[in-house]
C-alpha cells in the first residue's frame, strides 16, 4: 500500500484527538501540550498509520528530533513512511 | 477397578453411539498405550478398556501429536495406537497399573506429560443427583477426564460428548438428549450465549459449571439470570494441581477465608507475591507438593480473584502497568460486549499500548467502548485500538485464543 498523504495523517490525528473529546486546531504550529496531544496519542496515531499502510514504521531510521507542534508530528510520520 | 466403573450402566452419547458404558464396543490395548483418538467414541472405548484392565494409557486428539511427540511417547515405552496403525514402543515394558497420562494444554511449547491414576482423576464421588452431562472438552484434557470419570464411576451420571465441529450446534443436541448439567470454559459459555442464547436458555439445566480459565462476575451473572434455579459453579483445576477449588455461590473468585485452611482431602491454598500456590492431594505424580500455579490473584475484600497469568497479564505502557485481564473484564462488563481479548501491541515512544479484540452482542461503536473504559480505567489502560470480530475465536481447549 502506498504512503499516506500529509492530509490523511492529519485527519487521523484529528480522529485520535476526537476520541479524547479534544479538537485539532486549524493551525499546524499549535503546540501539542496545549492541545493535549500526548505520547500515548502519538503512539496510537503511529499504529493507525501502520494499519493503514499495512507495514510497520521503522522508528530507528530517522534522527530523533523534538516534536512539539502538530506540524512536527506530520513531518515525522511523513518521513517515517519514506524511510 | 470396580469402584472406578461403578457407573458402567450409565448412558453415554457420542457421535455414532447412544448406549451404556457396558455396551461400548471393546477396545484392545496391547500394553501401555498412547491412543491418538479421532473422536469421543474412540476415546471412551479406550477409557473403558483401561478401567477394566488397569492398563496404562494416554489419550489425546490425533491432531495434537506431532511426529516428535510420538517418538517421545514411544520412547516412554508406550504403544502408539493411531486407528489401524500400531507402533510398538521403543522398548517394551510392563504397564504401570492404573496409570493415566495427561498432556498439559500448554499454549506455548511442547505439551508436558503429567502422571495421574483413574482414582486421582475421579474428583466427584458420593451420592450425586442423577444428571446427564454435556462434555464439550478436548479428548483427554483434564476437564474431559473429570466428566468421564464422573460418568464412569457414579451411577446416574450420563454424558453427552460434543465433538469440536459440533460446538456451534450443541444446544439442539443437548435438548434432544436431555442434558441437565453442562461444563465448559467461560469462553465456551460466552460463545454459546453469543451464538444462540435462546436455545441455550431453553435447556433444563440444573448444574452449570465453568472451569479452565479465570471466571469473571459478568459471565456468572449472565448464566445465573439464564438459569435461575441451576447451581452455577466454577472449578479451579489443572493437569498439574488437579481439581482444587470448587465455588458454588455465584460469585467470582473464592472466599479469602479459604486461604491457609487445612483439611484432610482438600487442597491448601496460599498467595505469595500475588501468585496462587496450591498444595493438593489430587495433584499429578511428581508435581511439587506446593505448586506455584503461575496464576495471578488479587485479594479484594473477602474474595480472592484470579486475574490472569503472572507473566502475560502485564502490559507496560510507557512505564505504567496495565493489567490485560482487568481491561478485559471492564470491556466484558459493557452490555453490548459478548467477548473481549486484550493484549499489548508494540508501539513507538511508550513501548506498547493496550489493544482489544471485541465481539459485540448489540450495536456499539469504538467511541462507546473507549468512553466506557475511560470512566473505569486509568488512561494508559484504555484500549487505543479496538478490532471488532464477527465471532469469538476459540481453541480446541475451549479457551479463548489469548
Image (cartoon, coloured by chain):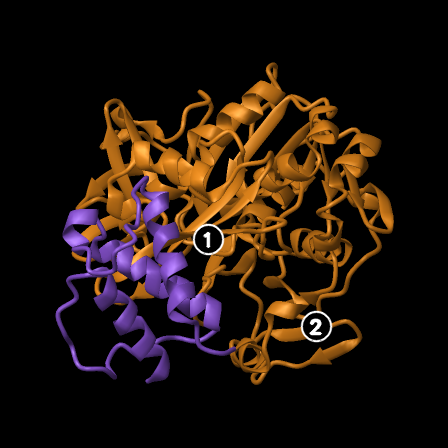
Q: Residue at x 21, y 48 (%)?
A: A35
**Image location (x, y in percent) of residue B184:** 58, 40
Query: Does B366 sit left or right of B298 as displayed?
Result: right
The disc numbered 2 marks a residue on which chain?
B
In the displayed structure, B11 sits above or below B101; it is above
**Image location (x, y in percent) of residue A31:** 16, 55
Q: Residue at x 62, y 54 (%)?
A: B138
Q: Nearer the viewer, residue B353 or B251?
A: B353
- The image quadrant of residue B98 is bottom right
Q: Residue furthest left?
A: A66
Q: Which mark is residue B81?
A: 2
- Give neighbour class at mark 2: few <14, some 14-19, many 20+ (Cα, 10 Å): many
Of callouts 2 and 1, the N-terminal one: 2
Q: Nearer the viewer, mark 2 or mark 1?
A: 1
The chain coloured orange is B
Q: Is residue B347 visible?
A: yes
On whether disc 2 and disc 1 are found on a single subunit, the reply is yes
Q: Colour of chain A?
A: purple
Residue on which the image places disc 1? B239
Q: Is residue B32 visible?
A: no
**Image location (x, y in percent) of residue B158:** 73, 34
The disc numbered 1 marks a residue on which chain?
B
Secondary structure beneath dot 1 equals loop
Query: Does B95 sit left or right of B175 as displayed?
Result: left
Residue contact between numbered discs 2 and 1, judged by CB atoms under 8 Å: no
Q: Nearer the viewer, residue B7 or B232?
A: B232
Amino acid at each position: 500500500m502506498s504512503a499516506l498523504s500529509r492530509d490523511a495523517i492529519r485527519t487521523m490525528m484529528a480522529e485520535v484527538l476526537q476520541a479524547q473529546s479534544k479538537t485539532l486546531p486549524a493551525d499546524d504550529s499549535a503546540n501539542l501540550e496545549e492541545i493535549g496531544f500526548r505520547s500515548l496519542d502519538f503512539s496510537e496515531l503511529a499504529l493507525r498509520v501502520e494499519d493503514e499502510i499495512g507495514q510497520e514504521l521503522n522508528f530507528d531510521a530517522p534522527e530523533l528530533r523534538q516534536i512539539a507542534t502538530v506540524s512536527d508530528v506530520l513531518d515525522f510520520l511523513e518521513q517515517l513512511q519514506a524511510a | 477397578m470396580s469402584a472406578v466403573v461403578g457407573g458402567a450402566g450409565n448412558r453415554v452419547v457420542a457421535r455414532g453411539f447412544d448406549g451404556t458404558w457396558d455396551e461400548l464396543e471393546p477396545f484392545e490395548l496391547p500394553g501401555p498405550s498412547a491412543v491418538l483418538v479421532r473422536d469421543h467414541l474412540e476415546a471412551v472405548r479406550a477409557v473403558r478398556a483401561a478401567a477394566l484392565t488397569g492398563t496404562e494409557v494416554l489419550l489425546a486428539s490425533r491432531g495434537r501429536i506431532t511426529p516428535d511427540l510420538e517418538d517421545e511417547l514411544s520412547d516412554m515405552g508406550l504403544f502408539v495406537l493411531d486407528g489401524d496403525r500400531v507402533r510398538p514402543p521403543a522398548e517394551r515394558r510392563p504397564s504401570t497399573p492404573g496409570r493415566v497420562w495427561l498432556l498439559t494444554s500448554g499454549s506455548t511449547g511442547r505439551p508436558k506429560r503429567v502422571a495421574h491414576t483413574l482414582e486421582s482423576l475421579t474428583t466427584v464421588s458420593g451420592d450425586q443427583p442423577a444428571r446427564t452431562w454435556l462434555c464439550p472438552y478436548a479428548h483427554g484434557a483434564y476437564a474431559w477426564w473429570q466428566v468421564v470419570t464422573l460418568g464412569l464411576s457414579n451411577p446416574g451420571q450420563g454424558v453427552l460428548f460434543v465433538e469440536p465441529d459440533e460446538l456451534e450446534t450443541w444446544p439442539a443436541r443437548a435438548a434432544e438428549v436431555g442434558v441437565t448439567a453442562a461444563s465448559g470454559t467461560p469462553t465456551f459459555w460466552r460463545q454459546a450465549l453469543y451464538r444462540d442464547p435462546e436455545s441455550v436458555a431453553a435447556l433444563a439445566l440444573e448444574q452449570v459449571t465453568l472451569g479452565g480459565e479465570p471466571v469473571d462476575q459478568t459471565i456468572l451473572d449472565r448464566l445465573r439470570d439464564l438459569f435461575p434455579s441451576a447451581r452455577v459453579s466454577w472449578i479451579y483445576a489443572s493437569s498439574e494441581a488437579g481439581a482444587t477449588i470448587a465455588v458454588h455461590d455465584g460469585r467470582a473468585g473464592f472466599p479469602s477465608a479459604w486461604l491457609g485452611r487445612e483439611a484432610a482431602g482438600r487442597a491448601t491454598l496460599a498467595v505469595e507475591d500475588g501468585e496462587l500456590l496450591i498444595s493438593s492431594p489430587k495433584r499429578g505424580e511428581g508435581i511439587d507438593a506446593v505448586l506455584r500455579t503461575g496464576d495471578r490473584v488479587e485479594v479484594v475484600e473477602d474474595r480472592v480473584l484470579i486475574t490472569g497469568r503472572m507473566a502475560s497479564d502485564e502490559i507496560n505502557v510507557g512505564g505504567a502497568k496495565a493489567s490485560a485481564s482487568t481491561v478485559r473484564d471492564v470491556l466484558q462488563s459493557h452490555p453490548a460486549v459478548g467477548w473481549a481479548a486484550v493484549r499489548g501491541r508494540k508501539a513507538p515512544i511508550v513501548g506498547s499500548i493496550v489493544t482489544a479484540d471485541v465481539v459485540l452482542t448489540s450495536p456499539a461503536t469504538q467511541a462507546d467502548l473507549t468512553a466506557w473504559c475511560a470512566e473505569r480505567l486509568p488512561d494508559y489502560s484504555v484500549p487505543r485500538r479496538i478490532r471488532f470480530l464477527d465471532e469469538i475465536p476459540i481453541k480446541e481447549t475451549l479457551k479463548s485464543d489469548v
